[in-house]
Image: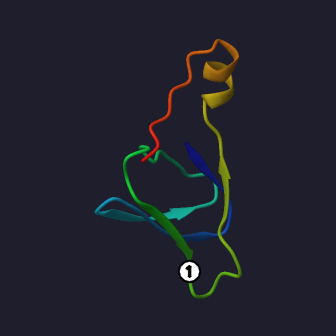
Amino acid sequence: VFQVFDGQGTVTVGERQWQVRRGDMFVVPSWQLFSAQCDADQAQLDLFRFADTPIFEAVHAYRADTP
């Protein structure tokens, strides 16, 4: 889960693309490619990412596939 902390820009998740701005939230599934780019008139696109991984690690239920 990502939240746009500051700025605005374009987010691409898999084959979908949309505009984001401060306060917006979006989800990136672990199996999708992800990219973000700030708009030309913006100095930056500041994103905050949070996940439930620490909870799963604490209860020893975290799983990860590595190639």
**Does 48 sit left or right of 35 as displayed?**
right
Residue at 65% x, 40% y is: 50
Of residue 45 and residue 22, the one placed in the foreground of this image is: 45
Amino acid type at circle 1 is Asp
Q: Which residue is mark 1?
A: 39
Picture layout, residue 45 above or below residue 67: below
Image coords of residue 21 (percent x, y):
57, 63
Residue under the point 65% across and 12% down: 59
What x and y, as percent, mark residue 45? 65, 69
Give the secondary structure at mark 1. Answer: loop
Quadrant location, the N terminus:
top right
State the image quarter where residue 33 is shown. Answer: bottom left
Q: Is residue 14 above or below residue 44?
A: above
**How busy is the neighbourhood of tag 1: few (under 14 within 10 Å), some, or many (20 plus)?**
some
Left-right relation of 33 to 2: left
Task: Tell me the quarter of the picture where residue 4 sits.
Answer: bottom right
